[in-house]
Amino acid sequence: MNNTTHCCNTPHAHTWFAGLGFTLALTLGTSASAAFVTTTYILNTPYTDSTPNVNKVVVYWSSQLTSGQVQQSDLTNWSITLLNNDTTVYSDTVIKQGSVQSNKGVARGIADVLFQFNLDTGVAGDFDNMLSGITLSSAASTAYNIYSYPTSTQGPPYSSLGLWKNGDESTRQLPGYLTVTSDIQGIPTPAPGAIALLGMAGLMGRRRR
């Protein structure tokens, strides 16, 4: 591009620089923008009303939000899996492609579930896959109410993590968790092309002066 050797002295150079700015904005604007998070809870004690006993809870979710407080209405997908080490005991797809799913035949909507996660701090908050767990007494098969209230904002019973099945109070246990860790993926960064354009834009800015 011969005009670039005269950078700021020709109309074509100004047009090229303006075009670069537009391309840069477009490239930055089309970079990935979604969070994908897996949070793993290791229970203090196993949940014993299952075969095998549950000793780990894994919560997977995704959202178009990439910062701030995420709530149930912000989720694209959300599932909860109960495990014995690496063996799946039970899995509940709470939200799929933005729609709340039934829990083993028991209907639920967005007002029937609770979710909180702070993407700025990486700290998992309260969650509950069925606020009215007693309704699972009419489930077509085994269905668990899985909840975590680390700040004890709701209850009773208060627990950092609790489980019970099929609305049967005798199955409720409050093992809590020993550790909780979250793997956060997908927080956007400028695409490689955008980084290259940023460097070019900075160079052009210096040459204009």
Image (cartoon, grey):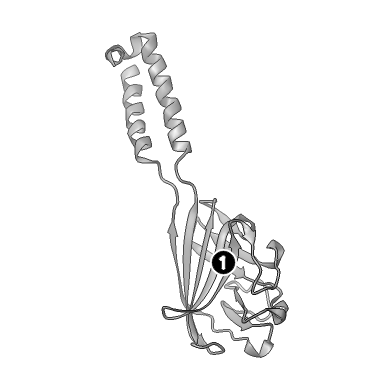
Near-viewer residue (4 or 124): 4
- Residue for point 63% across, 71% down: 128
- Residue for point 59% across, 86% down: 173
The residue where tag 1 is placed is 125
Whether residue 28 is visible to the viewer of this picture, yes or no, is yes
Q: Where's residue 188, x and y in %?
A: 44, 47
Q: How many marks?
A: 1
Q: Residues within 10 Å of mark 1 (few under 14, many from 20)?
A: some
Q: Is residue 196 left or right of residue 104?
A: left
Q: Quadrant of the C terminus?
A: top left
Residue 126 lies in what quarter of the image? bottom right
Q: Quadrant of the N terminus?
A: top left
Q: Where's residue 74, x and y in %?
A: 60, 55
Q: Where's residue 2, x and y in %?
A: 27, 13
- Residue for point 49% across, 54% down: 35
Residue 154 lies in what quarter of the image? bottom right
Q: Is residue 85 left or right of residue 48?
A: left
